[in-house]
Image: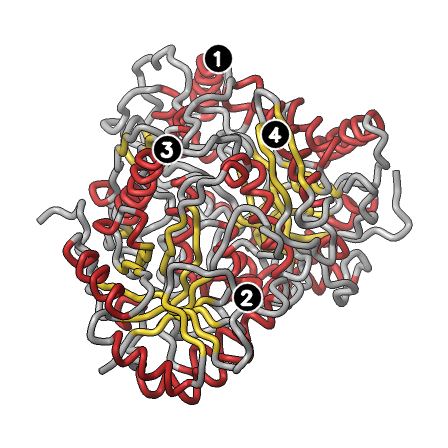
Amino acid sequence: MSDPKPRLHLGVFFTGVGPNLLWTRPDFASHTHIDTFVHVARTLERGLFDAFFLGDGLRVRENRGQIHDLDVAGRPDAITQLAAVAAATERIGLVVTQNTTYNFPADLARRLASLDLVSGGRAGWNVVTTDNAWTGANFRHGGWLPHERRYERAEQFVEAAKALWATAPGEVVERRTDLVDLRAAATVPASPQGRPVLFQAGDSPGGRDLAARHADVVFSANTEYDKAVAYAEDLRRRLAAYGRSPDAVRILPGASVVLGDTPAEAEERAAWIRREQTTGPRAIAFLEQFWGKDLSGYDPDGPLPDIDPTDEELDPSRGTLTIELRTGKLERIRQWRALAAERNLSIRDLVIEVSPGAHSTFVGTPGQIADEWARYVRTRAVDGFNLIPQLLPGTVEDVVDRLVPQLQERGVYRTQYEGTTLREHLDLPPLDARG
Amino acid sequence: MTLHVALELDGAPDPADIEALSRTARAAEQAGFALVTLADAPLPEGRVRIEAGVRAAFLARRTERIGLAPELHATPTEPFHLATQLASLDHASLGRAAWVIGAANTTEALATIGRAPLEPEALRRETADVIEVARRLWDSWEDDAVIRDVATGRFLDRRRVHHVDFEGPTFSIVGPLITPRPPQGQVVVLGAANLGVTDRLDVALVGGDGPDAVRRRAELARAEGAPLVFAEVESALTGAPDARPATDRIRYSGPPEGLVALLTELSGAVDGVRLHPARLDEELPILAERVLPAVATRAAGPTLRDTLGLPRPANRFAAV
């Protein structure tokens, strides 16, 4: 499939916590200060990005029962933070991650509609679910939702939110099932884009179906070219099954970028970032997740632990793990041992090799990466990327100042904003009657 | 004789217009109001209302000194989200957040989350619990929890981030908050004295049909532990009759000089007042020119606690 008028869409996915951000740099900007967020958002506007996209997590990460202390932690409520950013920006889309398992549909729909209205139609909602009761310990409903029903609730939740957004203030919307129970009405009129743009990130079959049915944007994990092509084909099949056009959804996988003046310099820098992200204590903590045991006595620069792991399931308290890492722990550890033995890897070397994110980083000169992305978008493997910064400040400025001009030269990136809403930035088709 | 003066911003001519609301909030800031409050409800009640927390957060970047107090209801929401939302408002406003505690309990309000109304004592208990858990969560990160210790690779000192382990009859919360401690330590909590949770408040709001009733209720609120007491006052300064339904608040209709005299009298009994103008846009310039200069405390800032003379609380979890 090739597109006569390809356009690459870029967002920044700011996790706000976790191992990506290198907090050890002396110039590390406060990860909670509103000025940091306003600065990033304005920089993205300068770079004509579609969206500034915040992550969310409803419990502070732990490692074996104790607060995990090695990563950036602590973040503001995304809706509140982006409502403040809305007052200080004009064009950038503002996307919040919000959980359907531990929110009430009418309450969340109302806060999202409010963000959408005050931003003049720039809001988006990344719909996520939680599959562990550990997170539920902060909420009225606790661990009430069985694992296999979380997407069923998400589906009903999103459908109820869309119904509330599609009605005039005061009109009653009622839903009564064993998963969603509400009688409510919108309190605000629709924004200029009609309703918040819906993002969906889950890569499981349930997540893909939710995306095909309801999402406007998928934030997939399939960044490598062949995987991206396969994912796009799968999604378009699912879209057709729900009677939606193949062009109804933008595919924006997560990705990191490391730029250099020469290919060698970029590679060197990327290796340095990986090593900084994977400190010795972090490498040990990563393995502890899988071993289920205290490994603090092992040298991160030495060989893998000689003790056997527990056969318990993975501890969910470290926060999100990619789907492929969640199951088959013992088999995975066996593969790691083989890999480490074959290539003589230390604990830290191994973790650098196998931890998530290792294969979703674009490394090169701005020209190289622009060529690569132009190919992705011309073949419709993706519609763009959600970039995950490692340096704050640094990554965002680098992409805006050095990579964006190269993309513009290749004719795959806008040279000015043509619309004012997030929906317009994303070139999404107008809403149909169902919203 | 001076008072802290708060202004209720509900009742703007076009409530969906956030830019108009921003101009009103800036005018209130210039007039010398200590804070604005933003009434809210989970249902429209015949009017358009942007969710109050979103309104307040937007105003955080459009104002510089004035306190921002959204009304957030304890009952039709998740207590954990409320605490996060308010801590985040305090971060976004650099220490100007407050919370008007709401306790919506109608069948319609609670049906928005599939709940039934609570009996009076259960409502009082849940309201108290939601404030209590918010206060614990705001303390769950000590001020110096983020250490960024490069030598050991530790971003946090985990001994300074605490579970709160709250258990009540209608909900329980383990914590900690996902947001570091708010700049004010504790967000300023305002609430009506008749909610029965005065011992959990920073500012008790009292009604009464006249200064004597206000004085009696203020004394009671202080005895119950409220650090500050504000009187609720409805004003109609434009000469047009006040057509609002009767409430339990002092109501004043007439020229601004009479309002100054009333507020002067109240200043012997309370620390502040919250004004509810009948016609916000028309009365605000009159209040700015002819009322506030005579009665209002100058906003000290930079935080709302500084302005109100409330100390920044010590952290309950900090090792002594």
Say which residue appears at 60% left-offset and 35% top-offset. A183
How far apart marks 4 and 3 lie (CA) works out to: 32 Å
Three-letter amino acid code at the position of disc 1: Glu
Residue indicated by mark 1: A331
Q: What is the quadrant of residue A404 in the picture?
A: bottom right
- Marks 2, 3: nearer the viewer: 3
How far apart marks 2 and 4 lie (CA) works out to: 36 Å
Q: Are marks 4 and 3 on the same chain?
A: no
Q: Are marks 3 and 1 on the same chain?
A: no
Discs 2, 3 touching: Cβ within 8 Å: no
Residue indicated by mark 2: B11
Three-letter amino acid code at the position of disc 4: Ala
- Marks 1, 2: nearer the viewer: 2
Residue indicated by mark 4: A154
Q: What is the quadrant of residue B206 in the picture?
A: bottom left
Instruction: Name the N-terminal-most of marks 2 and 3.
Output: 2
- Marks 1, 4: nearer the viewer: 4
